[in-house]
Amino acid sequence: GVRVRYLAARAYESFMFNPFRRVVVLTDRDRETLLRINPYLSVEVIVNGVHLDLFSPPSSPPPRTPNTLLFTGNFEYEPNLDAAFLLIEEILPLVKARIPDTVLWLQGANPPEELLEMAGEDVVIPGKIPAMRVPLSEAVVFACPLRMGAGIKNKVLEAMAMGCPVVATPLSLDGIVARDGESALVADG
């Protein structure tokens, strides 16, 4: 099961980087994990950035669409699909209890049939869109409740660059310098 795959991956990671003089990862957490597995590696961190010509709020931003939550991603990727279902099944009902006309936008490539079946008046799933900066400039909140995965989440960097308020799990903000209550709201998933 899952435990066997985890142990197999750990065993492979313990020697897979040996032929390389230097290994580059995206977060301090990834670096620490690799060094725990193999302390002899030379591991450096180079963080991701955002193309600010594409992701920056317009000088005169239009008003955001009231009561909209946004989550983006490729829904073939299991952590994104898990986050989408968490938003639909657990988070959206809590928000709607306080703000009844809240709508969740799930935007990104490859939404599977099981996700598309959840679409309705309160859950909008248009699939892949040409420019992600558009919903990031329109939504009131970027909600990123990732519970699994690794590395820096470019979607969070893009939301921040677009000036879209972010509510995220600690994992979603891993490797991103964000202070709870200042540059994002942090909540466990």
Image: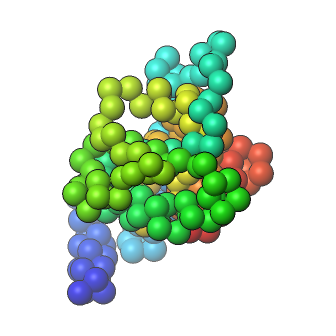
Q: Closest to the observer: 34 or 169?
A: 169
| Furthest-right residue in this view | 181
Judging from the image, the colouring scheme is: rainbow
Q: Is residue 60 above or below residue 172?
A: above
Q: Closest to the observer: 125 or 21?
A: 125
Residue 163 sits in which quadrant?
Answer: top right
Q: Position of residue 6 (x, y in %)?
A: 30, 79
Q: Is residue 177 above or below residue 5?
A: above
Q: Judge from the rendering whether residue 30 lies leftward or rightward of residue 99; answer left or right.
A: left
* Quadrant for the C terminus in the image: bottom right
Q: Is residue 3 above or below residue 145?
A: below
Q: Is residue 82 above or below residue 144?
A: below
* Quadrant for the N terminus in the image: bottom left
Query: Which residue is painted at 62% across and 30% down in the image?
Result: 64
Q: Position of residue 97 (x, y in %)?
A: 66, 63
Q: How many marks?
A: 0
Q: Judge from the rendering whether residue 151 lies leftward or rightward of residue 10; answer left or right.
A: right
Residue 39 sits in which quadrant?
Answer: bottom left
Q: Position of residue 178 (x, y in %)?
A: 67, 48
Query: Would residue 85 be seen by someone viewing this image from the given angle?
Result: yes
Query: Which residue is painted at 77% across and 46% down in the image?
Result: 182
Query: Which residue is painted at 62% across and 19% down in the image?
Result: 62
Query: Which residue is painted at 33% across and 40% down in the image?
Result: 126
Query: Would residue 161 be seen by someone viewing this image from the given angle?
Result: no
Q: Position of residue 121 (x, y in %)?
A: 44, 48
